Structures are given as structure tokens and as C-alpha cells.
Amino acid sequence: MNIDFFDNPDDAPKSRDDVRIKTLGLYLFEDQMRVAVGFEITKFLERPSIEVILMNERGEKSGSLHVIDTNDANFSLTMHIRDSNPTDTYDVHVKVYYAHPEKDPVTVQEFTRQLDRTQIGEQSHPIEA
């Protein structure tokens, strides 16, 4: 007898090497200085960590967000754009990794998307596998 715990095999929790962000959602608030960053992650067996870095058009770091050993596969957090002279676009660098106290972190996914500061509201970015 075969017992399936998941209707869809893609819903089964994944090992470290197979954990990915499926969707990155960005929502620019009306003040244009705050961004809600939403994550939809594959279900996981071990809790991943996530790093998000905002870089302005001048190549300067304008904000960062670190999530250490997340428990949730879907969540959002708010980042602040920390530029005294904001630019119209920002590169959003995202890294999913696993940290180990005695070894270097292991990156399992890394990508860059763009935030348009002239477009208030939602800016979703599906991530291709």
C-alpha cells in the first residue's frame, strides 16, 4: 500500500540543495523610502537563512535585511531605503544560504531583481528554477 502525504509531490519539504525562493514580492510604500519584501519559499526540511541587499544606481549599499534560520515558507518584512539622495532604481540582491558555526556558509540560490522607486505599489518577481 502506497501512502501519499502530499497531493502534489512539489509540496513535499525539500533538502538543502533544493530549497529555492519561488516568488520575491516587493511593495514600495507611498513614502518611497520603505519596501515590503515578501518571500515564497519551497517547503524545507532544514531552516534556511536569507540575505537581501539594496544597491542604488551609484553602486552604494542602501539597505539590508537578514533572516536567520526562518521557520516560515511565506512571510514579508519591511526594509528602509537609507539613501540621503535616493535613486530611481535599486538592485535587490537576494541570497538563500545555510550557515554552519564551524564552516563557511553554503549558498543554494542567488539572484538580483530590480526595484523601481518611481512605481508605488506591488512589484512581484517570479523566480525561474
Image (cartoon, rainbow, N blue to C red):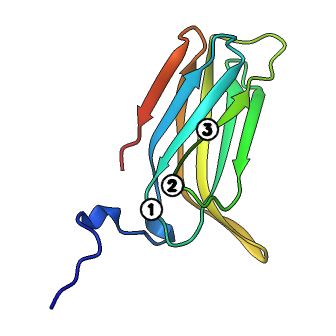
Q: Residue 83 vs residue 94: left or right?
A: right
Q: Compared with residue 48, is residue 55 higher up or lower down, i.e. above or below?
A: above
Q: Which percent across, then down, holds residue 46? A: 56, 71
Badge nearest the viewer, 3 or 2: 2
Callout 1 crowding tier (Cα within 10 Å): few <14, some 14–19, many ≥20: many
Q: Amino acid at mark 2?
A: Ala
Q: Amino acid at mark 3?
A: His
The residue at which mark 3 appears reads as 93
The residue at which mark 1 appears reads as 43
In the image shown, does 47 or 88 lie closer to the viewer?
A: 47
Q: Which percent across, then down, holds residue 45? A: 50, 72
Callout 2 crowding tier (Cα within 10 Å): few <14, some 14–19, many ≥20: some
Q: Secondary structure at mark 1?
A: loop
Q: Secondary structure at mark 3?
A: strand
Q: Which percent across, then down, holds residue 20? A: 46, 55
Tell me how far mark 2 sits from mark 1, CA to CA: 6 Å
